Image (spheres, rainbow, N blue to C red):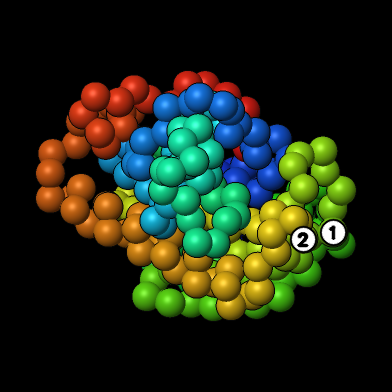
Amino acid sequence: MSTWICDPRLTLIAAAFLLAGCLEGFGAGARAPETVRVAGGEVTIGGPDGYCIDPQGSSESEASSFVLLGSCAALREDPDGPHPDRLAVLTATVSKSAGGPRVADTLDDLAEVFASPAGRAMLSRSGDAESVTLLETQESDGVLLLRLQDESPHDGPEVAREYWRAVLDAGERMVMLSVIPLSSRPLSADAGRALLDAFLARVQGENAAAEEAPASGEVQEAEADATPPPGGTGG
């Protein structure tokens, strides 16, 4: 476990779980592509069918890239546009610096970190370990899956207390994905996991294909005519 405690990429973990400051965006009329390339063009993020990138809620910082996804129909202000079968807030956080232990090689250590008080404090929206209950931890093909409940109060949108996270590698970067149901549109644990699996499959598929093509060397959307997400309120 000491390997992960000493790893500077734990700052990415902390940033990824600071939900209250990150779930903004979904602005009317925002251009909403299906995919975006971040981390110097090395990682592509896309969501399940019906989900698009919210540029107003996505951002870059020195430590990480934060991507927010929502309904394509809502973001494009097109009632006839694609919309997800299961609606939730989806987020992805990508490390901007390579190095440190790979997730796939340290799953047990990383799971132990999250089960500790320090890890649960990282998971908490308020930074209080007592507010978080780690309900379930799974390992699947080099990916760590977490189901948790966070009782912290927050000033963001009304989201469910129980949600799913996934921690994985994309090339030399660490990626964290989240599926956070809305309070008004709750999902069962199985439905949330199914949505996370679809999100995970899309991200892994996009990056498996990207590894076969030269990296662009700069942040850019996967669509040739798109522009990078503006700076915002990333976690």
Relative side of 77 to 133, left or right: left
Residue type, label 2: Arg
Please tell me how crowded label 2 is: few (under 14), some (14-19), or many (20+) other residues with Cα within 10 Å.
some
Horizontally, residue 56 falls left or right of residue 180, namely left
Rendered view: 196 above or below 69 = below
Res 11 → quadrant: top right
Q: Residues within 10 Å of mark 1 (few under 14, many from 20)?
A: some
The residue under the point 58% across, 78% down is 190
Q: How many marks?
A: 2
- For label 1, the residue is 151
Give the residue displayed 74% in from the left and 56% down from the top.
184
Asked if the residues shown at circle 2 and circle 1 are in contact, with their CB atoms under 8 angstroms apart, the answer is yes
State the image coordinates of residue 169 (x, y, percent, origin top left). Answer: 38, 57
Residue in the image at 39% along x and 71% along y: 142
Q: Reading the chain from its start, which is encountered first: label 2 or label 1?
A: 1
The mark found on residue 138 in the picture is: none
